Amino acid sequence: MPITNKKLITQFYYAFANIKPENMAICYTEDIIFKDPAFGELKGERAKNMWRFILAKNKNIKITVSDIFVNENFGTAKWKAEYQYGKNKRKITNNILATFEFKDGKITKHTDDFNLYNWSKQALGLKGLLLGWTPYFKRKLQTEVNARLDDFSKNFKK
């Protein structure tokens, strides 16, 4: 079983690095639970749409993955995303620790943990430096990105 789960994680990040969100989505169970500091908690098709949304906006994203560890039920991986953000095309380098739970050969729970303050300083400059560490900023960011995800999801067709 651990080799299968390692292949699953490798397949997931290979699809991510090659801008193939549908190949990422098939790695998830239908009732996937995804969580990260930017989006908060997303479930099911909404979690899958998050990857579609991210990759629709970031065709030049560079993804690298390392330190994949899995066992029968759980796994972890370190990954790095390098991309440009926003109208000003600010350079972002985001280091993420992913944790996974597996069920029936698929990912059933996926949590990405990263330093939101470091991300906000890169993405927003002075505004991120001054406000990026606050709970207010996190709530506002989650509200905004989830609204954009909702708009994307309304117009998305598989």
Image (tube, rainbow, N blue to C red):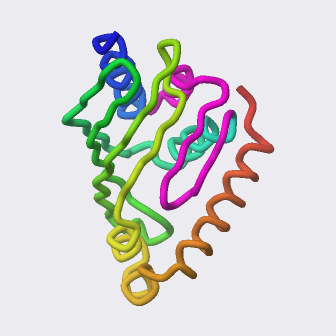
With 32 as the anchor, is 37 left or right in this view? left
The relative height of residue 76 versus residue 87 in the rendered view (above or below) is above
The relative height of residue 120 versus residue 23 in the rendered view (above or below) is below
Q: Give the residue drawn at x 31%, y 41%.
A: 63
Furthest-left residue in this view: 67
Q: Give the residue drawn at x 42%, y 34%.
A: 100
Residue 30 in percent (x, y) is at: 66, 25
Residue 116 in percent (x, y) is at: 40, 67
On the rendered image, what quadrant is the N terminus found in? top left
Numbered circles on residues, count: 0
On the rendered image, what quadrant is the C terminus found in? top right
- The span picked out in magenta is 19-44
With 84 as the anchor, is 70 left or right in this view? left
Is residue 93 inside the magenta stretch?
A: no
Residue 130 in percent (x, y) is at: 41, 90
With 123 as the anchor, is 86 left or right in this view? right
Q: Toward the viewer: 157 or 40? A: 40
Q: Give the residue drawn at x 59%, y 44%.
A: 50
Q: Toward the viewer: 46 or 154? A: 46
Residue 51 in percent (x, y) is at: 54, 40
Quadrant in the picture for residue 65: top left
Quadrant in the picture for residue 156: top right
With 104 as the anchor, is 142 left or right in this view? right
Q: Toward the viewer: 45 or 74? A: 74
Furthest-right residue in this view: 154
